[in-house]
Amino acid sequence: MVRSGIGIRTAQQTSERLAGQIHVYDGEGKGKSQVALGVVLRSIGLGIHHFMESRVLLLRFLKGPGRTYDEDAAIEALQRGFPHLIDQVRTGRAEFFGPQDITRFDKQEAQRGWDVAKGAIASGLYSVVVLDEINPVLDLGLLPLDEVVRTLRRKPEHLEIIATGRGAPRPLLDIADLHSEMKPQQHGDAGIDGIEIYTGDGKGKSTSALGKALQAIGRGISQDKSHRVLVMQWLKGGKGYTEDAAIAALRKSYPNLVDHQRCGRDAIVWRGQQQEIDYVEAERGWEIARTAIASGLYKTIILDELNPTVDLELLPQEPIVQALLRKPKDTEVIITGRCKKPPAYFELASAHSEVFCHKHYAEKGIDLKRGVDF
């Protein structure tokens, strides 16, 4: 995290909070459904690590049968890897429509999905309930907003609620404990297909990347192929990071498909106070990443916290630009992390979402929950 524009915090000690929170991810940018799946993966990984069961309901509005969505493959990977933990319900029709096109069927399907959600929330059986695309459902008036808000206010204390989609209405944002908005960023030309960047001060960057890892594995499963994934993390050389549990869960279910490397000190790296070991570790991580990109062995490569590493001038930009220019066509590269000055390789991205933090429960003095926030 950037702190007063001086340094970047990459590790912190904090106690666990007991209460589940209401997350809202909206905006025009890419990554909303991905971040929800990343949170799911983290929760499952934490449950495995602590011998607890994290049961999840994925309730997907406006995504009926007959159309393929990006997150379908990720959900397939989750259900194959953790079949007893993941329940999925899809409602709605398969095509886009506006307020002038609403039919009785649309309202019936939205209500069917909401009835399932109400039952799941009241049951207390789930640790995470994802209400994917409920924001546009409410924006279109397909569900009574006051009833949804009232139900979410009364959720069990332990339950995490994740609401996604464009156009979150104000009453939902008012009760949310966290609100991150994904805004698309344009860089002139279309960029290189398969390069995605997630930046900004809001929550959801590394989490979205985990969702992309799930997508790659799931696409391989559907094609009866082995789609390998590399997660390379900078500035995270210690122990106890949340991603560790999530990645460990993936590697347990797909041991031959997921590789994980990280580099750096278990400390805050302040601008102007970089140590020699910081440069050495950053370069070591880049050599691994550069070789992986050139090899063509990986379907998806996640370069987690590369942006702040470059922002701190621990790595030069030009070798990264050249490696991305020469990447194999079918290799996907996901780059995350906040930065003050956009590096040159941002111009190569075909998709770039900046995550804005409008609300975070840490601002209320609520302790962060291991497996969800860090």
Image (cartoon, grey):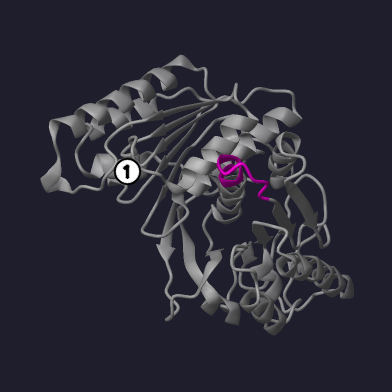
SS class, disc 1: helix
Does the stretch in magenta take in 162? no
Which amino acid lies under the numbered mark 1 shown in the image of this protein? Asn
Q: Which residue is drawn at 68% across and 84% down?
A: 318
Residue 343 appearing in the image: no
Left or right of 365, for residue 48: right
Residue 189 appearing in the image: yes
Residue 29 appears at what percent x and percent y?
Answer: 41, 60
Left or right of 161, for residue 335: right
State the image quarter where residue 358 is shown.
bottom left
Q: Which residue is drawn at 71% across and 67% down?
A: 293
Q: Nearer the viewer, residue 265 or 183?
A: 183
Residue 237 appears at what percent x and percent y?
Answer: 82, 57
Determine the residue located farthest toward the top in the rendered image. 123
Q: Quarter of the image containing the N terminus?
A: bottom right
Highlighted magenta segment, given as a residue range? 218-227
Residue 369 appears at what percent x and percent y?
Answer: 63, 38
**230 shown above or below 86:** below
State the image quarter where residue 86 is shown.
top right
**314 shown above or below 223:** below
Does the stretch in magenta take in 220? yes
Residue 334 appears at what percent x and percent y?
Answer: 60, 61
Residue ID for mark 1: 135
Q: Which of 349 and 162 is in front in this view?
A: 349
Q: Which residue is drawn at 72% across and 55% down?
A: 230
Label 1 CA crowd tier, 10 Å (few <14, some 14–19, many 20+): many
